[in-house]
Image (spheres, rainbow, N blue to C red):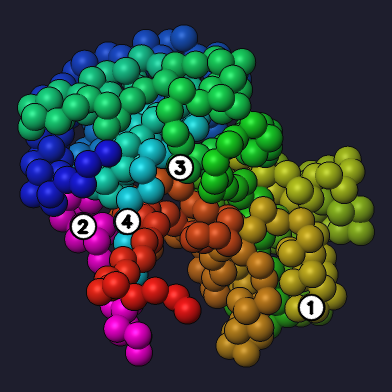
Amino acid sequence: MELLDTAVKNRVLESMMKIIDKKRDKILEANKADLDAFQKDDQALYDRLVVDQSKIDGMIQAVREVMEQEDPVGKVISKRSLPNGLEIVNQTAPFGTIMIIYESRPDVTIEAAVLAFKANSKILLKGGKEAINSNKVLVECWHEALEENGLSKDWIELFTLNREETQAFLKNPSEKLDLIVPRGGERLIAFVKEHAQCAVLVSGRGNNFAYVADDADWELAKKVMVNAKTQKISGCNALDKILVDQSIPDFEGKLKDLAETLKSHKVEIVAEKEVLPLLNGASEIPSEDTWYEEFLALKALVGQVKGLDEAISKINKYSGGHSSTILTKDKEKAAKFMEQVDSAAVYHNASTRFTDGGQMGVGAELAISTDKLHHRGPLGLEQLVTNKYYVFGSGQIRE
């Protein structure tokens, strides 16, 4: 795709904000059709599907935030002159064509597209069938904004392929793909990795952990864990596993208190056999596989550990590499935890629910990457570029 001037891109985004605002009723009507057709057997998926006036306000705000951010393309990363006279400049460049595969959330249709467009990349949006009506209307808004400013609709495309058609496209794409971002569970990620012919950036599962150290402020720890677990169960940054140090004063009393606190928030508790008698109403985990699960529900697994090292080892074995938090008064203990736990975001005395582009000051995000290449954590506008070397010479040859 051609390199667009920043002013042109921002004019499209100005138009887009006005169009979304103007078409609120049409967006809500389309979303109602999706909600009416949805089998409400997956509460987390249903919650992600809902669009209301507040969600539309959020879409407009996401576009505004990206519009106000500095253009990430063409920024000089490094510049050097070599003894042979070559001038070498490394600067940011667009990816080219990005494909994102996601379920349920119509707001991703706005956030992913606005980021890709401002980063001068074409985007192919493969949303889930459950949000088809909402996504169609939102992409119509994008196309109107593009055409209003003299640009091709090809910058933003909606794919409505089924699983078999998607598989065939990934194996033999009809156009060159430069990056694929699967946002979903392990099955989707494995599916994309198996069939993709280009780079895949994994927006991994959550399965986030909290470790309550032996010196934790118990009331603070409970407040943080309740927020991380219950504030939004459909978030990939929601808490799933709780590890309580056996050396915490009144271990048995604190586990009983934790059980009552979680139950008061309607959280189902599953637990290791060793602590089951202390957690009233809890059920034993059926197998070790439960430690690997991302629940996306009012459900938490509670276990015990002997010290910081065991907590770190357990988290690194089972977690999704997304977010982990330590509850402790000891800054040195927290530093060791944060350095050695292999997660995209590590916290000290704070809820995992802050692993989010907006909450971390990044702005709208394409995904939360759990990959280590080329970026980890919230993938915002600044991260949605690659780089290119520009080498300027005057006839130099290599001897």
Q: Which residue is mark 3?
A: 178
Write down the region rendered in magenta.
64-88
Dots 3, 2 in contact, CB < 8 A: no
Residue 22: where, in percent of width, then height?
Answer: 11, 25
Q: Is residue 139 in view?
A: yes
Dots 4, 1 in contact, CB < 8 A: no
Side of 135 relative to 166 (left or right):
left
How far apart are the two marked residues, 1 and 2, measured between alpha carbons?
Answer: 43 Å
Query: Reading the chain from its start, which is encountered first: label 3 or label 2?
Result: 2
How far apart are the two marked residues, 4 and 2, measured between alpha carbons?
Answer: 11 Å
Residue 381: where, in percent of width, then height?
Answer: 32, 54
Dots 4, 3 in contact, CB < 8 A: no
Please, is residue 122 above or below residue 301 in the view? above
Q: Secondary structure at mark 1?
A: helix
Q: Amino acid at mark 1?
A: Asp
Q: Amino acid at mark 3?
A: Asp
Residue 192 lies in what quarter of the image?
Answer: top right
Please, is residue 255 above or below residue 193 in the view? below
Q: Residue at x 47, y 43 (%)?
A: 179
Q: Mark 1, mark 3: which one is toward the viewer?
A: 3
Query: Reading the chain from its start, which is encountered first: label 1 or label 2?
Result: 2
Q: Amino acid at mark 2?
A: Asp
